[in-house]
Image (spheres, rainbow, N blue to C red):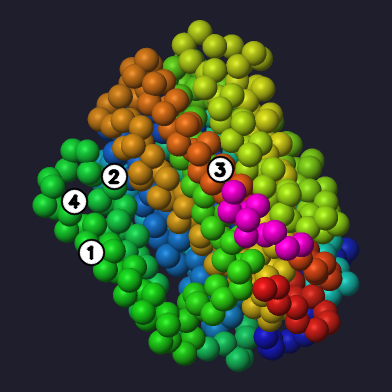
């Protein structure tokens, strides 16, 4: 974590500790809540603007592009200029962008505002955990992180329900207004958060971040607009995207302080874990985008009903993730990370039963439960393996890279999967064609999970040595854990 301006001094069971927890939990909760409510609101949003599927894709991908590209830069900014300061800037930025989303008069303005939201989230998300690590004394840090994880999981669980209620009772615009009172709480609580920074922080890798934005934006445009866009424009966008990503890798190789230290990928376990992350989270990103729409378009659920239908997934994650992490520490991550994606794939294949005339108890609930069990078995072991694959001094950046990989995987899936499944134009308005395309997407997503399982089975064949004092922090249904408090003792590097 580096040297800070002051030694950690905040205790858990003190007023200061409660203020720090309130600021970080509510701040990160805003980004978590926003990620879960938008999917449920997509059909209503589409009706409001007369949008086609590509427009709905851009509402999600614009946010994911900037969040993915600036996530690691956001953590570096906090280390360099002050974690509290950057966290507050992110809160103000995110709330201002949320207000712009709420009043957006056109789909184009909404997409631009969502991109701005992603920048704010990239400052918020890594900052919340960095503040906890830098302010709480080591003996209380685990309790603080546990509280952050647990209450953050509650935000994840309530997101679809609250979002569905707001859409049903009022308007999709209120899902963005919801962020404003939460931001006010963060700003008040942050007055009691001490400032910390890392005096040894290196220079910022702005070129790498900008090239990543160009690469992701170009590739996303080519994928989303391919079905109906002008071929020349689509081809140019794809070439620009590919050139941006290649240039980003070259810049990272030569940078003294790279945003993504490529030497981390010399660890086979780290590389394998990130390949599994990409496969599994691509499947999750695509399915969660399409499922919330399917429940409303095909089964006729309200936005509230669709949001409530997915609650078992989060409750299973909250109940079983920690136990799955403990299991992986005892037996190694190979089998949990092999069986977990296969169980997710089984849940996705059970969703093939969802169609016109399906019932929740007989068709939706069994698939959702199996899907949740697979997630619970996968996420915590994956986070443990990522942290255990690198030296302890690289734990923060390793988990940050893994989180960025998960976001990019979701971005690629949301951009590409509807096109591959034939879900283009205004097909989301007609139940039968949408259901057929959704089933195609389910087969593709189940295949991605099976591929992730195969990569884990082969790449993690050798059981890892146990890692001491690792604290798991995962974001159910969102992304793997972001950062980890640095364990004591000699660095461990898995081959």
Q: Main secondary structure of the magenta part?
A: helix
456 magenta-colored:
yes
For label 3, the crowd category at 10 Å Cα-Cα, with few meaning under 14, some 14 to 19 and many 20 or more, is many
Distance from the alpha carbon under mark 1 to that under mark 2: 15 Å
Label 1 vs 2, first from the N-terminus:
2
* Residue 234 numbered tag: 4
Q: Is residue 117 left or right of residue 202?
A: left
Q: Residues within 10 Å of mark 1 (few under 14, many from 20)?
A: some
Q: How far apart in space, not on screen, are marks 3 and 4 (Cα)?
A: 29 Å
User: Is mark 1 in CB contact (under 8 Å) with mark 2?
Assistant: no
Vertically, is 426 above or below 209? above
Q: Earlier in the sequence, mark 3 or mark 1?
A: 1
x and y percentages locating residue 307 in the rendered image: 57, 29
Q: Circle 3 is placed at which residue position?
A: 449
Q: Residue visible at 35% across and 44% down? A: 416
Can residue 384 be seen at all in this image of the molecule?
A: yes
Q: Secondary structure at mark 4?
A: helix
Return the residue at label 2: 224
């Amino acid at each position: 974590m580096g040297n800070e301006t002051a030694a950690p001094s905040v205790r858990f069971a003190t007023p200061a500790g409660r203020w720090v927890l309130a600021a970080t939990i509510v701040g990160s909760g805003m980004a978590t809540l926003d990620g879960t409510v938008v999917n449920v609101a997509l059909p209503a949003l589409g009706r409001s603007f007369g949008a086609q599927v590509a427009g709905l894709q851009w509402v999600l991908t614009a946010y994911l592009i900037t969040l993915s590209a600036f996530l690691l830069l956001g953590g570096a900014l906090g280390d360099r200029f002050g974690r509290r300061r950057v966290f507050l800037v992110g809160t103000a930025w995110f709330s201002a962008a949320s207000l712009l989303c709420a009043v957006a008069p056109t789909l184009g303005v909404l997409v631009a505002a969502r991109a701005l939201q992603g920048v704010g989230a990239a400052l918020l998300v890594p900052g919340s955990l960095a503040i906890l690590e830098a302010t709480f004394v080591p003996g209380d840090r685990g309790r603080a992180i546990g509280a952050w994880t647990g209450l953050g999981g509650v935000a994840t669980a309530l997101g679809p329900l609250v979002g569905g209620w707001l859409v049903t009772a009022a308007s999709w615009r209120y899902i963005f207004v919801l962020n404003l009172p939460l931001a006010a709480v963060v700003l008040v609580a942050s007055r009691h958060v001490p400032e910390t920074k890392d005096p040894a922080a290196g220079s910022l890798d702005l070129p790498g971040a900008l090239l990543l934005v160009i690469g992701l934006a170009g590739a996303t445009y080519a994928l989303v607009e391919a079905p109906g866009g002008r071929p020349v424009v689509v081809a140019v966008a794809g070439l620009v995207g590919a050139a941006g990503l290649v240039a980003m890798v070259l810049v990272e190789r030569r940078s003294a302080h790279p945003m993504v230290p490529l030497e981390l990928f010399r660890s086979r376990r780290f590389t394998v874990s990130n390949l599994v992350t990409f496969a599994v989270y691509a499947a999750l990103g695509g399915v969660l985008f399409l499922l919330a729409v399917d429940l409303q378009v095909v089964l006729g659920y309200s936005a509230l009903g669709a949001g409530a239908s997915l609650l078992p997934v989060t409750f299973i994650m909250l109940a079983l993730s920690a136990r799955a992490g403990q299991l992986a520490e005892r037996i190694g991550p190979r089998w949990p990370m092999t069986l977990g994606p296969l169980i997710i794939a089984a849940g996705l294949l059970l969703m093939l039963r969802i169609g016109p005339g399906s019932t929740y108890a007989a068709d939706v609930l069994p698939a959702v439960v199996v899907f949740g069990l697979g997630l619970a078995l996968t996420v915590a072991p994956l986070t443990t393996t990522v942290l255990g694959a690198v030296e302890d001094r690289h734990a923060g950046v390793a988990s940050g890279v893994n989180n960025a990989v998960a976001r990019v995987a979701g971005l690629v899936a949301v951009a590409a999967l509807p096109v591959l499944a034939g879900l283009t134009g205004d097909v989301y308005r007609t139940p039968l064609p949408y259901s057929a395309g959704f089933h195609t997407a389910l087969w593709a997503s189940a295949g991605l999970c099976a591929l992730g399982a195969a990569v884990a089975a082969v790449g993690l064949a050798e059981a890892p040595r146990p890692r001491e004092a690792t604290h798991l922090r995962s974001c159910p249904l969102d992304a793997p854990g972001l950062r980890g408090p640095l364990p004591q003792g000699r660095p461990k590097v898995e081959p």
